[in-house]
Amino acid sequence: MASRSFIQALASKQPLYRLSNVCTRSFTSSVVRCQQAATEPIVPSSPDDLKKPIRHSVRASEPITPYNMTIAKLLAAGLHLGHSTSLWEPSTLPFIFGTREGISIINLEHTLVYLRRACNVAREVALRGGNILFIGTRPGFQNLTIDAARQCDGYHVSSKWIPGTLTNAHQVLGRHAPPDPEDPGRPPKTYKPDLIVLLNPLENPIAIAEAQLNKIPIIAITDTDYDPRLVTYPIPANDDSIRGVELIAKVISTAAKDGVFRRKQLLDQQEKAAKFSRQQHQQRR
Amino acid sequence: MATLQPRMAMDDDLLIEREKPGSLSYFTGNFKYNDLLIDLDHLYKQHAEWKPEVNDAEQPDDKVYAWKLREKMSEMMGIPLKTSQWRKITLQLNQLASLPRPLPTQVAQVLAIYERSVEQASSNVSVSKSNTLDDLGRAYGVGRRKESSARCWVVEGEGKVLVNGVELTDYFQRPADRNKVTLPLSVTESTEKYNVWTIVSGGGSTGQAEAIKLGIGRALLVHDDALKPTLRKAGCITRDPRVVERKKEGQRKARAKYTWVKR
């Protein structure tokens, strides 16, 4: 069930970009927030701020984490805007809130739930020391994919997914790998990812097929023109807006980073416990 | 003292040490190249707002960077580089070099690795007979046309032309061929200034004549480089690439086909 304020916002025919002011639990408090927003200047006063290049499309005043994710943030990033109704995939019906001006609107409550689930998966995989691979092959996604991968000690594919990376790893990945120092004749060891985060599944059917053959789970951003049953953990959201995709990639990457951190903590604990027990053993002797 | 927390069955393999690939771009298939692009991009973003202190005492640094060529760069990196890949790398390097001078030390260090070394440039210049007159004042030029090949020596003199030891008028019967041979000299108005000794072989009369024409043109350039535009307009510099086209199977000749039969 969608929240009442969300329905009211859409029904009131306000321009969609301003809904972030309106979308709250109770309708009355939003009026106060509107007034507060009006007092802050929209155009920065000093000219230096205008001249600075906009490096990050999502300027977060507070850090974006899976724990403080709200529907308001998803709405601000434009993740609810689906594709044209004539291009829709009927199997996405459960995730569609309705249609407006010829496009399908995605129900962000489902998006939030599925996003949280994807974050949990990423965190647990990272906790167990798994390799997380971020794939974003659209030209606008290159930088955000690389940043997301770097943040959580994962891997990225941001230009082209070479067919055969998983099924023909010996040739594709082994080609540039350094030979074994002990045994130069043996083909070098190749690695496989344990989780794939795919930011544009529509353009990468080969990557999905290879992952399925190798039993690797996929988290993917599925828009209203893509069947969500083709991937393991779909996130029904808009795959066109760079701000939106950056938000999702950052959130999943943050969750994975938490997992990596937790793993380090557990390893340290284990080491300390082992040291302690060794000391005890020596003392007893 | 044993640990107080109860251990779950799956905790045992939770913390197993797993071998992981070293590079961020491992799954791109070409990790060294991709890592390099990412590092250069990251370096540029780090120093994007570099404002050097303007020091009037130091002279402005107008160094133009020449980057290593594709083969040298791929040798240095240890992976084969395609031209498009090399171009992308040099694009990033140019972007770094376009920062306000003097460059930050980190950037300068990185750029120095990919700079073309001077020895590479100098080795291309070859000192050979073709650039200078020899000790007897002779300029040497080679001309080729259509299976004929001519070696020409041009030296200061009265205007004699000898082809294979024979006078020009005796060797070439057709006046057209004779005119072709003397064209470079007549166009530069140096018919009475130079003597020409030529050895020509291969091909037929016209081919040999045009080969000599090219050879004399090249030898004249050694004497005087300023004649180049005049000779080029007259058509004495370009080696005519036209050769006899091969015959193809299923056709009578190179282009002529057998009569088309409906049935």
Image (cartoon, coloured by chain):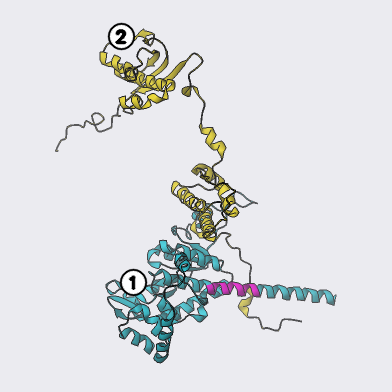
- Distance in Å between CA atoms under marks 1 and 2: 84 Å
Res A201 label:
none
Kindly identify which chain the residue marked by label 2 belongs to. Answer: B
The residue wearing badge 1 is A225
Specify whether residue A256 is painted magenta.
yes
Tell me what residue is drawn at x 68 percent, y 73 percent.
A268
In percent of width and height, residue B186 lies at: 32, 17
The quarter of the displayed image where residue A8 is located: bottom left
The residue wearing badge 2 is B169
Q: How many numbered marks does the figure carry?
A: 2
Magenta highlight range: A254-265
- What shade has chain B been given? yellow
| For residue B244, side relative to residue A3 (left or right) | left
Specify whether residue A151 is painted magenta.
no
In percent of width and height, residue A141 lies at: 43, 64
Check disc 2 and give the amino acid type: Thr
- What shade has chain A been given? cyan
